Amino acid sequence: MNPEQLGTEVMKLSRDARAGLAERIILSLDVPSDEENLHVCVLEAEFRLKELREGRAKEIPAGEVSVELWLPFPKRICGAQAARGL
């Protein structure tokens, strides 16, 4: 089936079905490849290292970061992690 034939068939679907399909197609376009993800991660790591070396950022121990991340969540949601302060 070529794209034109596929489009004809898609137009036979209900509006809701077409909207769902359109959303899936659009989301598939926004997914970067593994290579693109790696490139972005490397750029971010290099940027952060430069910020640290130049004194424009400071290191924060992982334990402190974990506590800050969990603070907004009630213990009933986070369970053991919140109770332990993680």
Image (spheres, grey):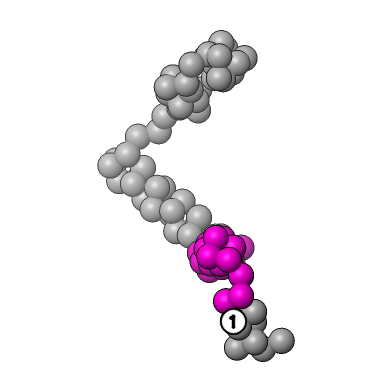
Image coords of residue 14 (percent x, y): 58, 66
Query: 20 or 66, which lies in front?
Result: 20
**Would you say the magenta stretch is mainly helix, strand or loop?**
helix
Numbered range of the magenta stretch: 11-36
Which quadrant would residue 57 be assigned to in this image? top left
Q: Is residue 49 above or below residue 13?
A: above
Q: Is residue 24 magenta?
A: yes
- Which residue is the site of mark 1? 7
SS type, badge 1 = helix
Residue at point 60%, 88% (across, down):
4
Q: Is residue 25 magenta?
A: yes
Q: Which kind of residue does numbered mark 1 sit on?
A: Gly
Q: Is residue 20 above or below residue 61?
A: below
Q: Is residue 50 above or below residue 65?
A: below
Image coords of residue 53 (percent x, y): 35, 45
Image coords of residue 82 (percent x, y): 54, 16
Residue at point 60%, 83% (across, down):
8
Q: Residue furthest left?
A: 56
Image coords of residue 47 (percent x, y): 38, 53
Q: Is residue 81 above or below residue 32?
A: above
- Quadrant where the C terminus lies? top right
